[in-house]
Amino acid sequence: MSSTAIAPTPLAELVSQAIEEQPVWDMHTHLYPPTFGTPAGGSSGKADPQGLLLWGIDELLTYHYLVAEVYRCVPASKLPYADFWKMSKQEQADHIWRELFLERSPLSEACRGVLTTLEKLGLDPSDRDLAGYRSWFAEQDPSDYIDRVMEIANVSRITMTNAVFDPNERQRWLADPQVGSDPRFAPVLRFDNLLRDWAGAARLLSEWGYEVYEEQSDASLENARGFLRDWLDRTRGIYGAVSLPPSFRYGGADDNSTGSVALREVVLPVLAERGLPFAMMIGSQLQVNASLRDGGDTVGKSDVGSVLTLCRDFPDNRFFCTMLARENQHELMVAARKFGNLMIFGCWWFLNNPSLIDELTRMRMELLGPTFIPQHSDARVLDQLIYKWDHSRKLIATVLADKHADLAATGWKATEDEVRRDAKMLLHSNFEKFLAG
Ligand code: HDL
Ligand code: ZN
């Protein structure tokens, strides 16, 4: 029995290199350029407590994934949620570092990600020197640091989530029309409320000067279309996006629920006239534990049939779609075989773990070839790009190498150009081309 490690085959090496070297256009993140403000000023000195650009070790450690995980270690009976939220960001980070990294091995994907990020930035995770990490981050200038993180993660462009119903974000766009013009970032107009809560959205639109009422009259619907057009113009969004609950249903032309009417009469016509895709992220059951705040959402099985109906009934619209439940994945991939105006993407949120990224990517490649978008980072903290893409690239490369090995076994030898073309499709051009229509 040989004890020496088995060298990867030249083909596996080539695939790994092609995936590593291919810049990725990250199609869904919650990241922002410094023009949106940042709570950690770093060496720039300009700190905005309500700023939207999150970066640095304390933001990495207080990512809502880790807040949820730390409450498995020190329950609310011992640390009431209100006491945790009263802590400073640094105190919260200290608590999480101690409980998840020092008192227990940081085995979860979100914990491991912090360590990968530190290592790729040239810091030594085994130092366990949180104070030292903090001093290093404090010396970074936010805008220069964006370039550095994008270079390490090999991310060519960061797609934002510009939530028009978030007062903090909306005010920043109204105050400075150029706020989203940093070329490193692509804007996306996000408008969940229109579909999740028409009545509430109508009240807000009325406050904002659009005559939109709960009753979905022709005038109300036309004014809602006007609102969407205005904000697509203001943000120059490259697609429209919503997250939808597991209960989301679209039953066709006779479905007159307020959400379906808003979808059929407002969202899809405006995006079709603008030639912009519509991204549906389906399966997030919000705030099952509101005390965890952003970490309080869960997953639920959703209805792929509604996606099929939309793709069939709206052939002039293009749909990005990702679903949150593992149980929906195979049916969604088969749906993508039925409609070319459906582009499935990413291993979203609770699926963004090695075992599930591998499973989904294998299934997708076997059913769809290279015609899907395997991943988005969903990063909320800038530095997360480093680990989310490092981890996912390795997994995507392993699957692609296995599939090319299967081809080679038939006698089909891929050329280096063909392998690099595959990498470019998966990490960049499938997204870019679907955007272009
Ligand atoms: O709705 C979404 O875009 C989700 O990605 C949520 O932001 C979620 O909280 C998240 O951060 N997932 O990774
Ligand atoms: Zn997201």
Image (tube, rainbow, N blue to C red):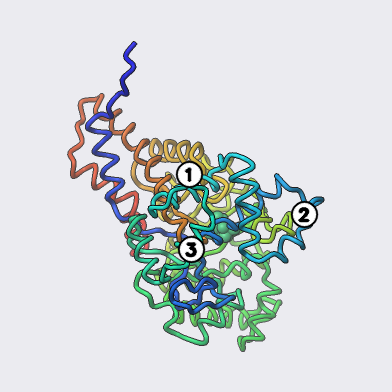
- Frontmost of labels 1 and 2 is 1
User: Quick one: 6 or 175, which is closer to the camera?
Assistant: 6
Does residue 214 appear to the left or right of 339 in the view shown?
A: right
| Location of residue 108 by image quarter | top right
The residue carrying mark 2 is 79
Name the residue furthest right: 77
User: Quick one: 431 or 54, which is closer to the camera?
Assistant: 54
Looking at the picture, which amino acid does disc 3 mark?
Ser
The residue carrying mark 1 is 126
- Residue 344: tell me if it is visible: no
Considering the image in quadrants, where does the N terminus appear? top left
Does residue 365 appear to the left or right of 232 in the view shown?
A: left
Give the Cα separation between the discs numbered 1 and 2.
Answer: 28 Å
Looking at the picture, which amino acid does disc 2 mark?
Leu
Q: Which residue is located at x 23 percent, y 46 percent? A: 420
Looking at the picture, which amino acid does disc 1 mark?
Ser
User: Quick one: 87 or 415, which is closer to the camera?
Assistant: 87
Q: Earlier in the sequence, mark 1 or mark 3?
A: 1
Instruction: Give the vertical position of 373 relative to 43 (above or below).
Output: above
| Location of residue 256 by image quarter | bottom right
Where does residue 186 sit, x and y in percent of width and height?
40, 69
The residue carrying mark 3 is 135
Name the residue furthest top: 1
Marking on residue 350: none
